[in-house]
Structure formats: C-alpha cells, structure tokens
Image (cartoon, rainbow, N blue to C red):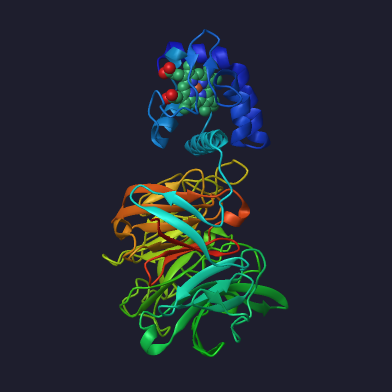
Amino acid sequence: MRPSSLLYLAAAFAPLSLAFAQNVRATGKINEFYAQNCVNCHGAKLEGGVTPANNKVPSLLSEQFLHGNDDESIAKSIKNGYPEKEMPAWGAVLSDKDIRSMVIYIREQQFLFKRGQVKIEKLADSFDGKSQVHSFHVDTWVGDLVEPWSLAFLGANKAIVTEKLGYAYLIDNGKRAARPLIGVPAVDTGGQAGLLDVVPHPDYAKNGWIYFAFSDPQTRDGQPVSLTRIIRGKIKGNALVEQQTIFQAPVEMYPKAGGVHFGGRIAFDGKGHVFFTIGERGTGTNAQNLGVAMGKVHRLNDDGTVPADNPFAKDPKALPSIWSYGHRNPQGLAIHPGTGDLYDLEHGPRGGDEANLVLAGRNYGWPVITYGMDYPGTPMPGSEGTAKAGMEQPVTYWLPSIAPCGASFYSGDLFPKWKNSLFVASLAAKELRRLEIEGNKLVSQEVIFKGETDSNRIRHVIGGPDGALYVLFRERIARLTPAN
Ligand code: HEC
C-alpha cells in the first residue's frame, strides 16, 4: 500500500479501528465487527451504498463480485482493501482467521438473502421433481418412524431400519414390523447419542452377519459414560442373536455420556475390511491424539482383528485400528463402487463441513485447520487457518454449513445417469445433494430437492436393490423413482 493512502486511512478510520479494538477485547464476534466497521459503507444488510467521498460501494450479496466471487478473492479484498476507492485494508487489524470468519459471515448472509427471495415449500409427502439429468417421483415408503438413523437392505424385499432412540425394525415388502427387534443392545440416547448405523456384511446372503454402531452406555467411577461401539449379530425371527463385539474402546477412554459427535457410520470395502467412524466427542484435541479412539476413521478385519498393514499397527503409542485421524464428526462414509476410494462426510463447526477422500495414515486437520469458525462468530480456538503442511484438504467444504450426514454412491439401474454419483443427506439444510467426484476433485454438485420444516431433516440416503433411492427423513423413509 502507498504511504499516502495509509495516512489517509489512519485519519479517516481512526474512530472505527478504536471501536474495533474494544469489540475484539469484548467478544471478538464477527457480526459485531461488521456492524461497527463495515455497516457505514456496505449497509446493515450488506446491500451496498456510497462512501463519504461518494465512491460506489458494492453489495456483498451480489452474484458477481467486482474482484472475484471465490473465498480467496473476497478474503484478499478485505485484507488489502482498495484504498483508492476508500475500501480500507483490514489486514492490520484483522488476522487471517478473523478475515476467514468474515468470509463465512458474508456467505451466511448471502444464503439468508437468497433464501428470503425464494419461497421454499414444505415438502409434500408425495411430489415430483427435476434434477439436472433425471426427473423423479418421491413417495413415502415407510412412515410412522421416529428419527430413523440408518437403513440396510437384507434382500430384494427385506430391510432393517434403526431409530436413534434405540429401536431397530425389520421391514418386509415396505411394511415395518409392529414390534422392534429383540436383543438390540441398550444404548445411550442423550444428546446426539443413540442407535446409529446398520450395515450387512457384503456376504450377508451367505453368512448372515449384520453390523451395528451405537453409543455404548457404561459407568466409570459411578458416572455414566458412553462411546461408539461396533457389534455384529444375526437375525433369527424377530431377534438379534449370536452377537459379537467388533470394536470397543477401553471404558477408561469413554467420555461423559450424552453430548456430541459420535460418528457412527460403517462401510465395507469388499476385501474383508470394515471401516467405521468415531467423532471427537466435542474435544478437538482428541482428533489429533493417536492414543484415543475419538476423532478417527478406523479399519478392522470383518471379525474385529487388526489388519497387519494398518498404518499405525506397529506404533506402540497409537490405537492399531486407526486408519486416519484429525476428524471432527464423520457421519457419512461411502466407498466408490468403481475405484474403491473411501470418502467421509463430516460436520465441521460453523461453515466447515467437509467431504474427504480418506487415505491410510493421513491427518485431516481438525482442530488445527478448518474452513469454519466457532458458533458465536469467533475464530476456532487453537486453529491455525485453513491449510497446513502434512494435513489434508477436503474434496469440498460447505459454506454455509449444511450438516452433511449419511452418504452413498448410487450404483442402481433406475437412474442410469446418476451412476457413481455421491448422494449426500443434510440435516440443517434439509436437502438431498448429488456430487460427482473424481479422485480428489469435485466435478459438479446439485441440490436434488430441499425442504423447509424440521420433518425434512435428512439423516441418510441409500440405494435399494430395486435401483430406487431411499431417503431417511425425520419421521419417514421416502423412495425416489423415475417420474413417468
Ligand atoms: C469507507 C467505506 C468502506 C468501508 C468502511 C468498508 N468498505 Fe468494503 N468496499 C468499499 C468500496 C468502495 C469497495 C469497492 C472497491 C472497488 O470499487 O474496487 C469495497 C469492496 C469490498 C469488497 C470487495 C467487493 C467486490 O465486489 O469485489 C469486500 C469483500 C469488502 N469491501 C468487504 C468489506 C468489509 C468486510 C468491511 C468491514 C470490515 C468493509 N468492506 C468496509 C468501501 C468500504
């Protein structure tokens, strides 16, 4: 920056930076910083305006930014400013992390503005929709459920659904059993805890094994504690029998019961391994600690033994089941049917949700790097920015957050042009997304449909043996078939 403009700025904005200094000491919240330092020019609603010297101030809600629409360009504008047009350079008062928070804030406001412009209908139980390459029809397949968490097909007409509150039901020809499966383990249901994933072994037809993930309630020193545990069992009549534990962390490692971030997804690679996720349980440092089970993707042989070629199998300080680390709350896990690549979807903090290509031994960065900020609008404590050597970048991240949950690659025949697309369920945004991914690259992305009310929160999506897509809403499972 030219010295003359520096002087000019100092004179023009001394009161503003003073206000900022106080604000940062008081709360550091980015919306307050905007209100004190940007509003005069960019407007209370980010709508733009004019500067004291009558320069035109662009709207920050625009689809077409003067200096680039991507996050990096916006951050650069804020950092370096355009002093010749009276846009101050904020790099002296705002750290890169603060600037990142401001970009997130601008993205959220853009989203709210756009959302205010379109009327989003409450999704009907039955409706038709159009995506980029297929038209589809949505109908209720199984209703009368309470927070279904996962669905697995056990044959052409047989399925099993789990509910967060600890029930699993068999489904026969689209009809849910009147009574829940007997013998499902007791689960912690506090906060985000519950009965989580259910996935049959790839050779289920031969061996009958079904795998479950759940929040395992234990007591330690008289206090209730819980953590994600993986078991398998077989169905006999309406009961789960022959149960075996596949993974259970030592109870000394269990955090306080209830609370957040259990992970709890399971995926098979078809080569004798089972992958599963455990969230960091609300303690970011867990994710970087190889000595604990939290904040990791794990890999075991399908009988629970440790594969000899696991990346940390020979590290005496690490849990041998760990496949990758630095994860926050991975609630989606999917294997590409063509390449065998493993992807996870994880809830980040505000603005930091990620899709990752998950590779052996890699560090996915949480909480050291993140694209998000803390919920009050302050930088994540302890975070060092969005990238760091030795830590992986996501395939994509969502800003604002959509709260991605279950995900599956489509491999059916009913929607030929959706083959190998990754479908992603979202809770907060209440939408179903379709991603085309090649390796570590996002090729395209679209919203298939979007709901409005809490009953449209989507927990999971999987393809059925009939080629239809099954979507788990809050109270029902819907079925997507081609529209005629
Ligand atoms: C004194 C007036 C003024 C203030 C205060 C101000 N801006 Fe600006 N801002 C401008 C002007 C004028 C431009 C357009 C520059 C140009 O025409 O190249 C601009 C441009 C920008 C751009 C780039 C927009 C685009 O279309 O590429 C961003 C982002 C931005 N400002 C963010 C902020 C933020 C965040 C704050 C508060 C921390 C802020 N501005 C405070 C006047 C201001």
* Residue 359 higher or lower than 266, as above or below: above
Specify the quadrant that holds the C terminus: bottom left
For the residue pair 8 and 201, the one nearer the viewer reads as 201
Residue 409 seen in this snapshot: yes
Q: Is residue 364 left or right of residue 19?
A: left
User: Residue at coordinates 51% horizontally, 15% vertically from top-left?
Assistant: 9
Q: Is residue 476 left or right of residue 332?
A: right
User: Residue at coordinates 38% horizontally, 85% vertically from top-left?
Assistant: 205
Q: Is residue 26 left or right of residue 273?
A: right
- Provide residue 233's location: percent of width, then percent of height: 49, 86
* Picture mark count: 0
User: Residue at coordinates 33% horizontally, 53% vertically from top-left?
Assistant: 436
- Provide residue 67's location: percent of width, then percent of height: 38, 25
User: Residue at coordinates 39% horizontally, 65% vertically from top-left?
Assistant: 334
Residue 369 seen in this snapshot: no
Specify the quadrant that holds the N terminus: top left
* Residue 404 higher or lower than 106, as above or below: below
- Provide residue 377's location: percent of width, then percent of height: 59, 41
| Outermost residue toward the right in this view | 222
For the residue pair 151 and 144, the one nearer the viewer reads as 144
For the residue pair 455 and 414, the one nearer the viewer reads as 414
| Outermost residue toward the top in this view | 53
Q: Is residue 194 left or right of residue 138?
A: right
What is the quadrant of residue 177 in the picture? bottom right
| Outermost residue toward the front in this view | 484
- Provide residue 57's location: percent of width, then percent of height: 49, 17
